[in-house]
Image (cartoon, rainbow, N blue to C red):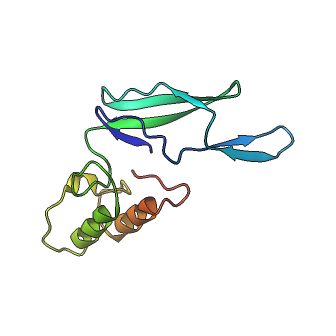
Amino acid sequence: KLHYLIGQSLDTAGLSIKLIYDNGESQTVSDGFTISGFDSASLGTKTLTVVYEGKTAAFDINVCEYLPGDANNDRKVDLDDVVLLAQYAAQWDVECNVAVMDVTADGTVDLRDVVLLAQYTAEWDGIELG
């Protein structure tokens, strides 16, 4: 999870790290590491540090006023948001938070946003919301 609301707790569910050894072999682990640097008290980009067996890596999260893709404002991004976004893109008369629906960050809300949000909620590898 790379987007958090102000005051939200760190969610490490499903978090794993890929270890790449000098000999080229790799291994994915989902426990035994520590994470530091999380602070959702203020808006902005925060850098988190992951430590595993003395080795470190870092990644950024964004603390924002809203979650990209949370069309129904229920503080989570799920299939309900995909449906609402699809209805909005099809020009149905629906109540939603339009400010969070341009998940491709291209300035428009259209079927590309619906597809990206559907891929994100299905947990496709490498999918991030704008």
Decide if residue 75 is in sight here: yes
Q: Which image quarter: residue 104?
A: bottom left
Q: At x 83% / y 45%, what residue is drawn?
A: 24
Query: Of residues 81 and 105, which is closer to you in this image?
Result: 81
Percent position (x, y) of residue 93?
12, 71
Q: Is residue 62 above or below residue 98?
A: above
Query: Of residues 39 and 110, which is closer to you in this image?
Result: 39
Q: At x 31% / y 26%, what residue is drawn?
A: 41
Figure disc tally: 0
View extreme (front): residue? 32
Q: Which image quarter: residue 6?
A: top left
Decide if residue 109 is in sight here: no
Percent position (x, y) of residue 33?
61, 32
Report the side of 105 relative to 93 (left or right).
right
Report the side of 61 relative to 33 (left or right).
left
View extreme (right): residue? 23
Percent position (x, y) of residue 65?
25, 39
Q: At x 28% / y 69%, what residue is drawn?
A: 83
Q: Is residue 72 above or below residue 46?
A: below
Name the quadrant of the N terminus. Answer: top left
Query: Of residues 91 and 6, which is closer to you in this image?
Result: 6
Percent position (x, y) of residue 118?
40, 66
Q: Is residue 89 above or below residue 27?
A: below
